[in-house]
Amino acid sequence: MNSPDIAVHVAGSGRRRRVEELESVVIRFVGDSGDGMQLTGNEFAKSVARAGHDFATHPDYPSEIRAPTGTLFGVSGYQIQFSSGQVFNSGDAPDVLVAMNPAALKTNLPDLKHGGVIIANSGAFTEGNLHKAGYGGNPLDDGSLADLRLYRIDISQLTSQALMGLGLSKKEAGRCKNYFALGLMLYLYGRPLDAEEDSIRAIRQEARHRRSQHRGASRGPCLRRVDGDVRHHVPDRVRGHRTRNVSKPHRQSRGGARLRRRVGAGRRSAVPRLVPDHAGHRHPA
């Protein structure tokens, strides 16, 4: 059974918006390796799946894991083809290119279909980023993209405005711009935002739960000073094993060597104490 047709909302004059119906679409999200393009693509694919479309995806990771920001070899991408019919691959040339910075645009522009759509984050096309990408000028202004449907959207600035008043730092707000791009594409292709908001909340709740578990599991034995006495302390749970608090007075062994104890999973092992001989050398007792 065929999936529903793909509706695309196209901006029109005034309040009127024109809607196009397509059989299939290929979209490519591209940006820096830290821009969250894989997450954006995955969430868009989930929305497409909920709508009943057939689809295929292709994540494209950068050649260097920690490449400098804005460089050509640090671009990360995610391509998806979805259709009202049957889909066998993720597509060849994308119909829509979502470019989060100049490097992403330069490395993926040759693949875009003639007359395709570019959604560019104009806020990232700064002089420094243009230089890193090898541009002599701004391609959004020099007319080199005249044969394409270019939409300049300052995603960085709009994201900061949307998060204003939430107490986030500039860096934290900048990390949310991939969600702005995701919401933009969901709206463009007529997908409801309520389901995506619930999905985002579930992801954040799971992430907080994992962080709390990690903090609890990483708490190992430690020393606490109680009334001038140093005691070994073990949390109630260490890596899933039930343990108990063990107190041992801090004392000196013969010859001044400390008696140290290590507290493991429910047992204690003593480090051999050193005893000096007649020549002053220390040996295990």
Image (spheres, rainbow, N blue to C red):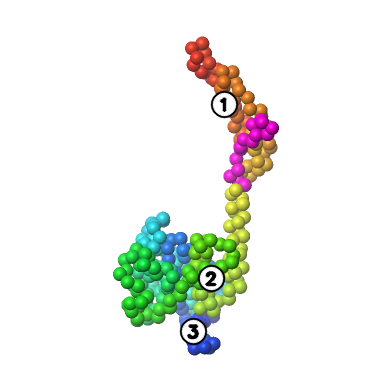
Query: Can residue 44 be spotted in the picture?
Result: no
Question: Residue 217: horizontal and vertical position, in percent?
Answer: 60, 45
| Label 2 neighbour load within 10 Å: few <14, some 14-19, many 20+ | few
Question: Residue 226: horizontal and vertical position, in percent?
Answer: 68, 34
Query: Can residue 237 be spotted in the picture?
Result: yes
Residue at the top extreme, as displayed: 278
Q: Which residue is mark 3?
A: 11
- The relative height of residue 240 versus residue 277 in the rendered view (above or below) is below
Residue situated in front as seen by the camera: 201 or 229 = 229
Amino acid of disc 2: Gln
User: Is-magenta flag for residue 41?
Assistant: no
Question: Residue 234: horizontal and vertical position, in percent?
Answer: 64, 38
SS class, disc 1: loop
Question: Residue 284: horizontal and vertical position, in percent?
Answer: 54, 19
Q: Which residue is mark 2?
A: 161
Amino acid of disc 3: Ala
User: What span is colored magenta in the figure?
Assistant: 216-231
Q: Which residue is mark 1?
A: 271
- Does the CB distance between marks 1 and 3 fall below 8 Å? no
Tell how many labels.
Answer: 3
